[in-house]
Image: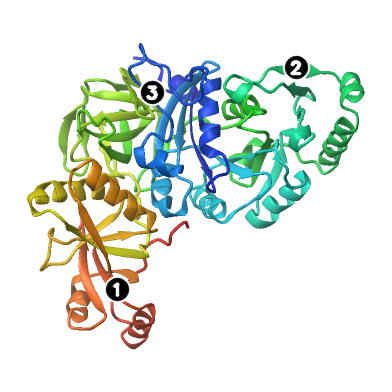
Amino acid sequence: MADTKAEASRRRTFAIISHPDAGKTTLTEKFLLYGGALTSGAGSVKAKGDRRSATSDWMELEQQRGISITSTVLQFPYRGNVLNLLDTPGHRDFSEDTYRVLAATDAAIMVLDGSKGIESQTRKLFEVCRNREIPIVTFINKWDRPGRDALELLDEIEEQLILEPVPISWPVGDGDRFRGLIDRRSGDFIRYTRTAGGSTEAPEELVDAAKAEAEEGELWLGAQEGVELLDVMERDFDAKRFESGELSPVFFGSALTNFGVRLILDAMVDLVPSPSPRVDRNGDPRPLNAPFSAIVFKVQANMDRAHRDRVAFLRVCSGQFDRGMVVTHEPTGKPFATKYAQSVSGQARETVEQAFPGDVVGLVNANDFRVGDAVYVDEAVQWPLVPAFAPAHFRIARTLDTSKAKQFRSGITQLDEEGVVQVLREPDVGDQAPILAAVGPLQFEVVQHRLENEFGAPVELAPCSWTTARVTDGVTAEKLRGMSGVTVVTRSDGEMLALFESPYWLQRLEIDQPELTLTKLIAEGT
């Protein structure tokens, strides 16, 4: 048996969050390039022969729309460590998926566009991280393009997020005059050279101060003034304040040209904490060297279209995972043999023999597994519940081909289990016309695309009149069923929801009948 604590100390498990188009997916793939997991053309993972390839945006609809729709698990080695990177959707409509993924991480990189600063989705995802007490590393991207003043961006981070930004790297020049970065820890000036399409690591040159002043002139002097100002302000890194969420180390660069990528990747090893004991539902930390346990944070079907399989992604929380071991699925109490355990990078897979705290393992055809479930060996554990977001959009789903009713029901069930949408059922209708509830309308596009292309079930998604959902109980449900403008449905987890056509009708009901049980779900993005 390996030393579990020692192996855990070599792991870093982190997510990347951003507003759409800030460069999150580009940064993800450049990490893989620097970790040796990409060939010279960023976008195709090394594989035996050329039988497989993967990018972080592997889903067909993602490539068509040019946005991240589903989270992706990517594992790669770097400096003798194992990095588990969870690339998350940037679009606000998929915030619920991001929220679930953050339950499996120990830190996050917040990517900002240097010309735009903090945008709405960035702020919402940051608050999710803050609520989960996840340390944040900030990467100000696209510094090779015209943008805002660096000090102005730091002020914005501090004022809007109540987070002290501490630059670790400082840019020399900007836009098309972006020459390189000063590493404030060592004082080194790292000058970069562009490569064709950013397809290889950017050559780096350490330049001493005298040579930098002679060759870079005013760009160097301006950068030096910025560094001196930061020193006077005592903007220095403090590990304890970082891990408590009070401070964020800041890095500048360009993911497209690879300028600064190595520095931030080094920071993920040097600054980000390794996995620590995870707190269970009772508030007790489970030691890293306790018997094996893990949390299911994602379920994905049809990643391999040839086999139509279903993968449950586990984040290892304690102990050592060995392929073939029999684990217990906590909600059902059933044993599950882990013969088909895989390490997944995008859509590419490899059999995984061992895993340790912080690692992500994909279990194929773990059909009973749901997001938030615990699996364990010997010592039972339950993890804190992963709450559902409050849906704001509703559609009624009906198959357009009755001969495909079985495929339709199967697809709806699968997408529900993955958390693509929440599936609600009325007692008298059931599976014939379930109600789909989503945070954002793009989720319905994903549902329709996947039902038609993966399950062969053409579907109609008809608009509904409901606008607001509340959790209710049996007693309240009986009183609501006779009222107009409201219907009571059941979610697949057994929770009863009351759907209202108007928030004003809901407010009136809460005032007139305060004894009714009408509880808010977690708000989107908070």
| Labels 3, 2: front one | 3
Q: Quick one: label 3 or label 2, which is nearer the N terminus?
A: 3
Residue contact at pointers 3 and 2, CB within 8 angstroms: no
Spot occupied by residue 224 in the image (x, y as percentages of width and height): 86, 33
Q: Quick one: label 1 or label 3, which is nearer the N terminus?
A: 3
At mark 1, the secondary structure is loop
Q: Quick one: label 2 or label 1, which is nearer the N terminus?
A: 2
* Left or right: where 110 falls relative to 502: right
Q: Residue furthest top?
A: 49
Residue in the picture at 44% in, 20% down = 7
* Left or right: where 89 falls relative to 402: right
Residue contact at pointers 2 and 1, CB within 8 angstroms: no
Residue 219: quadrant of the picture? top right
- Quarter of the image that includes the N terminus: top left
User: Label 2: which residue?
Assistant: 205
Determine if residue 103 is in view. no
* Left or right: where 89 falls relative to 495: right
User: Label 3: which residue?
Assistant: 53
User: Label 1: which residue?
Assistant: 465
Mark 2, other Cα within 10 Å: few <14 / some 14–19 / many ≥20:
few
